[in-house]
Amino acid sequence: MIKKIVKKTIKKLAQQRPIELTANFVECGSEFNGKTALVIGGGTGIGYAIAQELAANGAKVVVCGRKLHEIDNMDAEVLDVSKIDELKVALQMLINKYGRFDIVVNSQGICPETDFKQSFYEIDQADFEKVSRVNFESVYFVNQFFCEYYENNKISGNILNICSTEGLKGNVVPYGLTKAAVISMTKGVGKIMASKNIVVNGIAPGATATAMMKMDCDGNIRKDYIPSKRATIPLEIAKAAHLLLSDAGRQMCGQVLVIDGGESLK
């Protein structure tokens, strides 16, 4: 049901847009030829769009998630990032299997339906810890693992962390708090790694047409609070990711690019 609503919403957006929001929007190129990319959380939504963009431009892409997603022209692996104590072992096994990863994208994230409905006093420890493990702790330790891997193997690696504009607001819900932590970590790690020729950046999307995005009962994304009067689509975020992950973006270090139609400027 949700997938149908998202497709319906994207179709509506395409009718409003001056650019063509179709599969042709992912242009084929060779910029990432010879590079292997690991996209965690790449089976759906923003991660999927980034994986498609990288693959269309020459990268060998390995998509990981809690469920195995069969995607054309990509390899797929099961990776449960909530199991923090097993994460580094699992990442090393992926390196052993695929040889190396030049690019790592952290697009994992969960937002329980209750997250924005509960009051500050209603959020319990179990819910908080679950969201924290997936949205922040896993991202932190993936960054730690690959920065050390890149430095030890003298690889000019590139890491992209998908954040959220919810992390830019004063927030008490676990989703927003964890995204704020990812933004802070991205800036800090990016600064530390710049001198080692390891690039770490982030993208903070606003309202985006994915299954995670909250919609009204008619299947419309609320647009009244977005100055551009529309939601972002995943392909637009993928295009920004293309720049940050390319050689043209290597002078951008520890930056978090906001893509939200002007929402955060209000």
Image (tube, grey):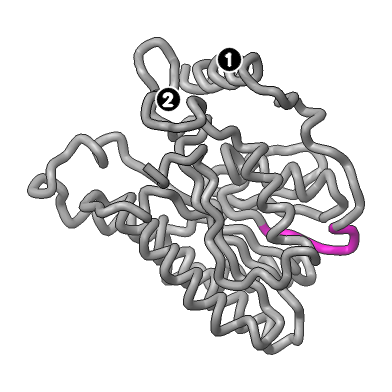
Left or right for 227, reference 240? left
x%, y% of residue 83?
A: 42, 62
Which of label 2 and label 1 is nearer to you? 2
- The amino acid on which the numbered mark 2 sits, given as a three-letter code, is Lys
Q: How many numbered dots are placed on residues in this image?
A: 2
Give the alpha-carbon distance from disc 2 to disc 1, as whole Å.
Answer: 13 Å
Q: Mark 2 or 1 closer to N-term? A: 1
The label on residue 12 is 1
SS class of the residue under badge 2? loop
Q: Residues within 10 Å of mark 1 (few under 14, many from 20)?
A: few
| Side of 95 where 123 appears, left or right | left
Which one is in front, 224 or 139? 224
Query: Would you place residue 240 above or below residue 117 in this image?
Result: below
Percent position of residue 170, x then y: 25, 54
Q: Is residue 54 above or below residue 152?
A: above
Q: Quadrant of the C terminus?
A: top left
Quarter of the image for residue 94 reads bottom right
Q: What amino acid is found at the position of numbered circle 1 in the picture?
A: Lys
Give the magenta range: 32-38
Q: Residue at x 63, y 81 (%)?
A: 194
The residue lying at 41 percent from left, 69 percent from top is 184
Q: Residue at x 82, y 55 (%)?
A: 60
What element does badge 1 sit on?
Answer: helix
The image shows residue 9 at horizontal and vertical percentages of: 54, 18
**Image coordinates for residue 160, horizontal then vertical, percent:** 61, 61
Q: What residue is drawn where x is 76% and y is 71%? A: 100
- Check residue 166 for magenta coloring: no
Give the numbered dot on residue 223. 2
- In the image, taking residue 207 as reference, residue 100 lies left or right, namely right
What label does residue 21 carry, if any? none
Depth check: give the residue in front, 94 or 40.
40
